[in-house]
Amino acid sequence: MKLYTIPFKNFSLPGLFKLRLLLFLGLTTFHNIADAQRIAPVVFTRLPQDLQLYPRNAEKEATVPISGIVETAGYDYLSVQVLRNNAVQKYLRAEVKYNNGVGTFSTETAIKAELANYNFKIYLCKGQDSTLITERKNVVAGDVYVVSGQSNSTGFFTEKDTSQFCRTFGKITPDLNTGAYDPADTLWAFSNQHSYNNGVGTMGLEIQKQLVQQSGMPNCLINAGFHWSSAAAHAQRTESNPADLHNGYGRMLYRLQKGGLASSVKAYIFRQGESEAYHEGGNWSGNFDLLRKNLKKDLANLAKIYVFQIDVIYYPSPVGAEVRDYQRRLPDIYPDLRSLATVGTKEFDGLHYGREGNKQSGLELSRLIARDFYGLKDTVDINSPNIQKIYYKTAEKKQVILVFDEGQQLVYPEPFKPNGQVTLDMKDFFYFNGESGSVASARVEGNRIILDLKAPQQATTMDLMPMYTPEDGPYYPLNGPFIKNSLGMRAFTFFKVPIGESLNVPELSAELESSGAVKLTWKKVPGVSEYGLERKLEGETEYKSIAKPDSATYVFIDKNIVQGKKAYYRLKGESSLAETADYGYAEIETAIVTGIEKNGDEIFTVFPNPVQKGQPMTVRLNKPVKGTLLLLNSNGQTVKSQNVLQTTETTLRVQENPAGYYFIQLKAGEQIWSKKVLVQ
């Protein structure tokens, strides 16, 4: 049986029937008559296509509606056989209700967002007789993504690989997706089913395949990239007709709307900026902002935008470096945005990437999406390291500290030989006020790079990597060396990042409270906007963060200590440009202050309290005890110790110790009791 789609105006129907059909369509929720499918004697207003993906809901299901009219009288109902992976799952029955000779029907079913294909066999029934009208195959439910940009977003639409749970909708237009769109191109396909017409590109397909694996559900990706495009071209939106088929944004939106996907796009992936770098576009930041606003208008539930930082290309201009640095900083400007570095991607030829490089980009980006949407657990170092601040550590300005994101485990590269004729050392790719050659050596400590300089510096800004690499230069194209993290993610290049000067080291002190908590105090450090307080307990090897006090806070009470152990503290101050030159340190012996017998009575009392220097104190116990009596100062250090031998009263003399608070601690077997006393 031949299936086809025709506009309503081409229906070969009597005039009265046309009018009745038009009245029916006007009363249904179907809004586009041109999408009706006539499979005589039925006109379907809603019917799945082969390979269609329906966007899933929060319950990981999607609704598949089937509705329309029957042209001929006498039919009772439509029967829909729903098959999951070719096994019958259920039957649906849609009664045909006639009015003025036109029969109407409607039904729907939910399918799960899972790695399964659903088929629909639709029968028209009269009494005991049924006729198969149509069958739709390989329908799925899942998530929707969009990739756009210029040539590095498309891979020139040459990828031939595909996958059964990776879908796309519509077609790529002529001239690398720059031509006008044919509104009749509204079919579903496997991604890259035809490498050009149904192209999502190598990177796009890798994103899809990785997300299928991570999420356990199908997905649809629309590649809306078009070549030779600027950010301004992507931001071009016709206000009176947003789905304008004659610009890139409109072509993208048309495909999303026709596929029933526009309100379900989860993320938009943008890979563009080379045009601006070689002066075939301008105002990248302003045009990107406009593009983002347009996307928020038309894609109602867009949750995330991902942007690739462009690579270091050949064009002799600082614009490329400026665009790269802005792309690096995008997450600080827009909270819904994530960026990803591209330097060091495989098979870079100076502008584009080979197939393995495009697959690498797809893999690296998919990890960010899987973390944001599918709860990816292994997220260590999946982000590109991003510079946070740079500062001179000493007043001499012969050492510089580069601080990257918290938690990054940086790896400093070995010298790199790109062509056997030149050796490139990473230390020569740090530019002070635009000039390289100032660094004598470099090393990594966690998320920091420490640069030792050949001579004192007065530079106020730093760049990482050159502005461009000339095509006739000794290391074109730039394929190394690069700062990486433990997962191999390369650090973002940066441009004209300010170099600050270190702040004064804070003075930290610690003393015990009567409750056993530790009171930490410090003095204000000029220029600090936030402090970082860390603790390490006896037996531990690393400090752990316990507080981030603001610049107006100079005291912290640590109640979450392990009593009876020595505690080590350190404090540093931070600003947006720098940190304190070192930590302020303090340590203290913690006391155990909770030791009460089962009956809840106090085991001993002390008097007088307060007590004068040199005056004896009486310690009276409510029953004979054998143990040790200790006098501790406020730092937890033992000042005096004496044994208690099965007695109910003893004395403890305070010698010429400094005035202040002390603790009397009684240890008896496994139990410890403490009391606070004041020496005047």
Image: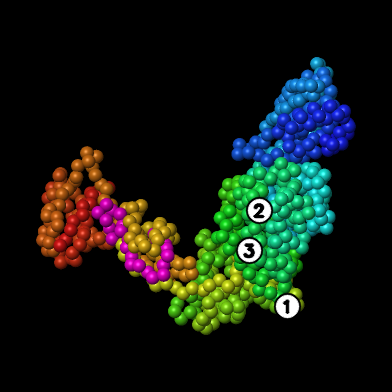
Q: What's the amino acid at mark 2?
A: Asn
| Residue occupying the far top of the picture | 127
Q: Position of residue 27 (x, y in %)?
A: 72, 30
The disc label shown at residue 78, or none? none
Quadrant location of the N terminus in the rendered image: top right
Mark toward the viewer: 1 or 2: 2
Q: Is residue 10 magenta?
A: no
Q: Earlier in the sequence, mark 3 or mark 1?
A: 3
Say which residue appears at 22% left-offset and 56% top-offset: 663
Say which residue appears at 55% left-offset and 75% top-offset: 461
The disc label shown at residue 294, or none? 2
Helix, strand or loop at label 1? It is loop
Residue carrying label 1: 473
Q: How many labels sit on residues?
A: 3
Q: Quadrant of residue 495?
A: bottom right
Q: Position of residue 381 (x, y in %)?
A: 58, 58
Is residue 382 visible to us here? Answer: no
Residue bounds of the magenta highlight: 511-535
